[in-house]
Amino acid sequence: MGVKISIDVGGTFTDFVAYDSESGRFYLLKLDSTPEEPEKAVLRTCEYFLKDSGKKGEDIEVVLHVGTVGTNLFRGQLKLRLPKTALITTKGFRDVLVIGRQNRPELYNVFFEKPKPLVERRFRVEVDERVDAQGRVLKHVNEEEINLVFTRLKKEGVEAIAISFLNSYINPRNEQIVEKKAKEAGFQHVSAAYNVDREAREYERTSTTVVNAILKPVVVSYLNRLRFGLSSLGIRASVYILLSSGGLSDIDEVSSRPVAAVESGPAAGVVAAAALADTMQLGNVISFDMGGTTAKACAVVEGKPGMVTEFELGGKVHAGRMVKGSGYPIRVPCIDLAEVSAGGGSIIWVTEGGAVEVGPISAGASPGPACYGKGGKDPTVTDANLTLNRLPQNLLDGKFQINRTLARRALRRVADEAGVDVTELAILAIRLINL
């Protein structure tokens, strides 16, 4: 009988829970996240636990990991950068990511701007190949042409490659050839659609593959550093990662297909809520999870959370069954979450027209809300709550102190832009996130 560890890596805080099955004791710990190197906060919590409990690395039986590393990357959390990615696609389909679908989050808003394409046009490369709807190869890939393409992309500093050809879900032969050539050219992070989303509809398949490609350099690097760090602490237990569907997978599988775990953290909250409801003999409940970057809700009906096979990533607001068009569609099994950019760290700002907005960018853990006193200058939802006395200045039994003066100072700058006083701005921000 050993110790089970569970770690939740959020955009603002990293939470640690350990259960010692021998003594029946729980250990709880919360630290600031380290978004640029998430493993640092994780390993720090493990170090504190081993030191305080007197346990050794070999006493750890299993490590469960959830987090929002992927979602925070796409939501533009401060200091996080999308890896430079190229898309290799069929001739004539270079702009499929831009054309997309007709979905619009605000049907009658003529000023609506579609989300920025994840791949710059100069890195969206057409290949003269074709597979028909029956899977017959009508035109084979020109390997010399492909070699020249990868030579150019290498010189341009591209870090990840996404490959999505028309009808490759029926016959992936051409994709497989290009995938092999990409690896031979020295690209470590290659995502081919036939391995990521083997279904019809080229826009959704391409979008899912591109998201997977962008996530790969970040997630693979993070998980490798995490695995090495745990080993250096003597923790050699199996590490399992919660998927967006609520299931479990290992590091190798998630490294290959990180898009499947992009909503890992929010899904974990729903799984926990469903388990708690079952313990309390409640069949129908609503779970709510407000983090530093987003707020999520889910309906648990007859003990089971709803599931979807397609949802949007990085949008201002989305729900699995109502794809709105403000984010990037991905097709993977996922717990049906309604998600909005209304976390504690969501930044309050003013548009060019003088309207007050909240999110989607978050202050994250570094610098965090202005009231944290870590150099943050932008006002956040947490600053608004503190200014309105909805939060005490001492949190976590006094171990974490927040500063109302700093919160008001940050709000005042934006309030002046909006032409309101500090209290009015704070009230406006809270009303906006509660709409």
Image: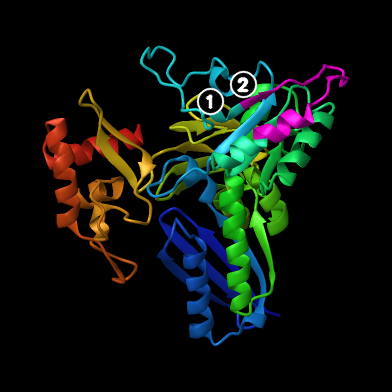
Q: Is residue 411 above or below residue 398?
A: above
Tag of residue 121: 1
Q: In which quadrant of the rendered image does the C terminus lie?
A: top left
Residue 279 position within the rendered picture, expressed as x and y whole percent measured from the top left: 61, 58
Horizontal side, residue 383 vs residue 222: left or right: left
Chain part drawn in magenta: 125-149
Residue, x 51% and y 28% (percent of image)? 117
> Furthest residue to the bottom?
54
Is residue 250 visible in the rendered structure shown here? no
Q: Amino acid at mark 2?
A: Arg
Residue 130 magenta:
yes
Camera sees residue 414: yes
Give the residue displayed 70% in from the left and 21% down from the top. Answer: 201
State the CA–CA distance, disc 2 to disc 1: 8 Å
Q: Quadrant of residue 86?
A: top right
Q: Earlier in the sequence, mark 2 or mark 1?
A: 2
Disc 2: which residue: 94
Q: Please tell me whether mark 2 sits on a helix, a strand or a loop.
A: loop
Asked if residue 28 is positioned above or below residue 124 in the image, the reply reads below
Q: Residues within 10 Å of mark 1 (few under 14, many from 20)?
A: some
Q: Nearer the viewer, residue 143 or 428?
A: 143
Q: Quick check: 365 left or right of 380?
A: right
Are the residues at dot 2 and dot 1 in contact (C-beta closer than 8 Å)? yes
